[in-house]
Amino acid sequence: MPPFTIVAGQAAPLLQANMDTDVIIRIERLTAPDQTRLGDYAFEMLRFLPDGSENGTFVLNQPRFREAPILLAGANFGCGSSREGAVTALAGRGIKVVIAPSFGDIFHANCFQNGLLPIRLDTATIAALAAEVEVCDMPMTVDLSEQTITTPCGRTIAFDIERRRREALLLGLDDIGQTLRLREAIGAWQAADRIKRPWIWKGALGPSD
Amino acid sequence: MAKTLLDKIWDDHVVADLGDGWDLMHVDRHLLHDLSGALAFDEMAARGLPVASPELCFATVDHAISTMPGRTARTFERGARLYDRMKAGVTKAGIRLFDAGTGGQGIVHVMAPELGLVLPGMVLICADSHTCTNGGLGALAFGVGTLECVHALATQTLRLQRPGTMRVTLEGQLARGVSPKDVILHVIARLGVAAGVGKAVEFDGPAVATMEMEGRLTICNLAVELGARSGLIAPDDVTFAYLAGRPFAPTGEAFDRAVVQWRGLASDADAHFDRSVSIDVGQVQPTITWGTSPEQAIGVNEPVPDPASGIDARARADMCAALDYMGLEPGRPLAGRKVDRVFIGSCANSRLSDLREAAAIVRGRRKATNVAAWVVPGSVAVKSAAEAEGLDRVFREAGFEWREPGCSMCVAANGELVAPGERCVSTSNRNFVGRQGPGARTHLASPAMAAAAAIAGAIADVRTI
Ligand code: SF4
């Protein structure tokens, strides 16, 4: 995973609550042979009208926000399905930061696995950011190492993030590599568990169907 | 210190304390399916990683397999590609696959409890958000993303932070014509779809204590629609009776020893929950969703709410968008609204008790001519058991299609979808925009309500059929 640095650019307001992962990426796109172009299909049900033409009123179709790397979102963003394609589709569109009052739990975890930064801010602060996007023309800047956002009108606000999550993003750390170093502890735990709960371990040797 | 069910399972599974509130947790069961399995094995191969504990992993095929009578895993072409990649992965790793055409196949959250693969006190994961279903057996079960799935395949562990705790106590008893599905839709409507974010939700109370296992699985299935990654119900005699004799459950003396451990899992009487709510389910009506979020649910005879009642401008705009998508006006009940499709299936409601509940309404009647009605059993075992009771004939004689097990129209990943603008009463768990196909209008309801809609040709109060 490439390390996360400073992100600066437009922040697109998409404040509808409960924006679910089915809307972020349709299931058909996840069964298609080519999974490298998911970004083309992010929010497709909102970006396009039933006749296939672009919906000009949708925020990410507006010239100013087409390339926006930051999304200002509503509560419970990314609720629903566990599909990691929702995160890769956003990343494929160039979105690097999503700011919302709350996130679906699995989506939130998936973001960190893919180098996308989810920031929790309260609804009023996000509404104020969205209002600034309308009146000030400067880009928004998100600085992860400083944990600050510089708003389009030039204010600086702080955000919280867990120390470990922050470090992993800044350094581009790989969870699996780190856990594999704990192989011995895992083996010891499993050996003890085979005695304590033998029924868990029938496993592949269990009855045939 | 007094502990909750969650705490007890959690503490039992910590392999290492990683600091800052993070634990390395052992995964006792890792369930895989065609959709996520293919992606996970591709990633494992790309990283050159072997599977650490294949004996704790089990796979089936459900999401992208056709449910057409006479289907194989290759009938739906896109699904065939995913199936091949998943099958190659499990074969190479030595993971047990409950394959299409064999007895154990089914929707992952239906076949796993049925086989006894899910046992109380386990930590169980699957790259699917409805993994929470399995919490009905007293396991800590939750959905993960693809890369977490890869982490678990490679190490049989996950790096996790303990979630918060929430207790939902269901008081009273269900009225006639009201099922666990109505109860959980009512709970979600009351508490909202974000009530459980960051929490594991434990359901308890008199209505849970007297509920059969399949109903408990339905309740926990929709915990994720409350925003919770896990739903939990403490194991009790109902649980143990359900598990006895299941193929992968322990037997004889080992079973008795296990039960002793399992009995100790229930939350201590004085355990602390971050939030506790109590809901009287005696008043719950047959419930159905009107909008595009599971919280947008009402009693079948209640009027569709007016957006003017929204608490703020944002809520009013969201309600207007939902009404517009669903082609509804506020102020009138849903009963009487014509429907085009009825789907009885999905991991929420495709078990034997669900099919019995629907068949009881259908028996001796015909579906309305304007409705296409499908029954998709959740697993091969459910299908065979239903056929042994003659339920397939009840449905067929009423003009329903009787199909092969899989996710089907719940998520439309296998090409089986609701056409744009069509109205569908569905026993599944998500009514999101486009969930059952682009432009599809989904009303979530119980199996009995879905059956009633098929007979009436319109949304109907099952108690009047
Ligand atoms: S039936 Fe629906 S909700 Fe359940 S696992 Fe399949 S797609 Fe997911």
Image (cartoon, rainbow, N blue to C red):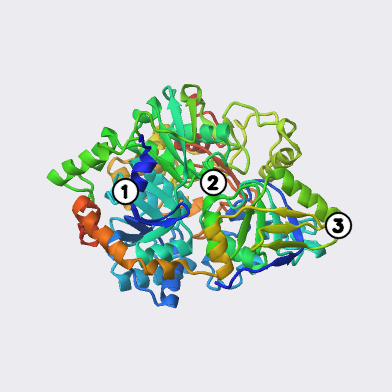
Return the residue at label 3.
Answer: A136
Is disc 1 placed on a helix, strand or loop? helix
Q: Are both tags, 1 and 3, on one chain?
A: no
| Quarter of the figure that contains the N terminus of chain A | bottom right
Q: The disc labelled 2 sits on which kind of residue?
A: Arg
Report the residue at 70% width, 42% height from top.
B318
**Spatial separation of the CA atoms under disc 1 and disc 2:** 33 Å
Residue at 52% over, 41% down: B196
Disc 3 crowd, CA 10 A, few/some/many (<14, 14-19, 20+): few
Label tally: 3
Q: Is residue B359 left or right of residue B260?
A: right
Tell me which corner region of the image, top left, top right, bottom left or bottom right, holds residue B17.
Answer: bottom left
Give the SS element for disc 2: loop
- Check residue B430 in the rendering and tell me which mark sits there, or answer none: 2
Between marks 3 and 2 in the image, the one whose residue lies nearer the viewer: 3
Residue at the image position 32 percent from the left and 35 percent from the top: B266
Q: Chain of mark 1?
A: B
| Residue of label 1 | B12
**Residue at disc 2, CB closer than 8 Å to ligand 1:** yes
* Mark 1 vs mark 2: in front: 1
Q: Which mark is drawn over residue B371?
A: none
In terms of depth relative to the viewer, which is nearer, B297 or B177? B297
Residue B243: give x, y in percent of width and height: 25, 42
Tell me the distance, in whole angstroms, between the alpha carbons under discs 3 and 2. Answer: 39 Å
Looking at the rendered structure, the kind of residue marked 1 is: Asp
> Where is residue B373 shown, x and y percent of the image?
49, 45
